[in-house]
Amino acid sequence: MTTFPTILDYYASPNQREAEAAVLHFQPKGQKHRLVLDGSIYFPGGGGQLHDVGEIIGENGGRLRVERVQFDNGSIVHEGLLEAGSFEHLEPVRIRLDWNRRYQGMRLHTAGHLLHDAFLTLRPTGLVPRKAEHNRDPYVEYHGSLDARDQKPLEESIDALVWADLPVVMREATFDELVAGCRFLPTNLPKNKPLRTVRIGNGELVPCGGVHVARTGEIGRVVVTAIHQTADQTGSRVHYQIVDR
Ligand SMILES: [Zn+2]
């Protein structure tokens, strides 16, 4: 598919749940349809955070139920069921997110990073993260073995950082800035999109292309549910959940 660059509005406006945009490209794909816009608040997923779902409604009556979102060579591709009408080139559309899913995803993702910062205050050396998931069964995975007895102190340490209501700052960064500023660099940094970082309060600068809540107070209470070794015994996972509000 030719490239139709989309402005990634979810970074500049992570709390926007509705927006207007214009159609750049629209085509069927099997039983579904794919739609590319000039700007989108739909997060395409990544870094362990789920993509958004929702609906896109055209000025001429087209309605797309968005079920999948992908980042493809500069474009955000919204894919889903065409429930009514069609879409024309440059037609103005109204986009809406399933905000509960998105906000839950942002809280879970920020909670994962906060867990890491809190863990570093308990164990300043020896913690090397290697993977994370921030959706249904969220966890942060580290190299080596960890002590399950850290579960309670870790939870208390996270709790203190939530109460401190620290700012969460996301921004774009060059590869050199990542090398200079980040203690841990993943081997699989994306090559097809701008690199980004997140920092919570005065915590670690971490490579991250996710979408976050603005302050740690929004996360609410975090429960560390388990610390155990991975099946291959080369690492450990710290499982957590956020308490629904
Ligand atoms: Zn992240």
Image (spheres, grey):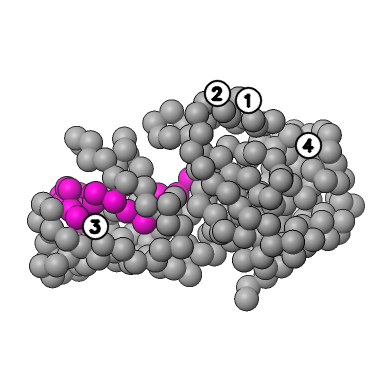
Residue at the location (87% across, 51% down)?
A: 150
Which label lies toward us, 4 or 2? 2
The amino acid sitting under disc 3 is: Ala
Label 4: element kind: loop
Location of residue 242 with respect to 202 vertically, above or below: below
Q: Earlier in the sequence, mark 3 or mark 2?
A: 3
Amino acid type, mark 1: Ala
| Residue denoted by label 4 | 127
Q: Which residue is mark 3?
A: 21
Ligand 1 within 8 Å of the CB at mark 4: no
From the viewer's perspective, is 2 left or right of 155?
left
Q: Residues within 10 Å of mark 4 (few under 14, many from 20)?
A: some
**Which labelled disc corresponds to residue 176?**
2
* Label whose residue precedes the other's in the sequence (4 or 2): 4
The quadrant of the rendering that contains the C terminus is bottom right
Kindly identify the residue that appears in the image at 24 percent across and 57 percent down: 21
Kind of residue indicated by mark 4 = Leu
Q: Where does label 1 land, which residue?
A: 180
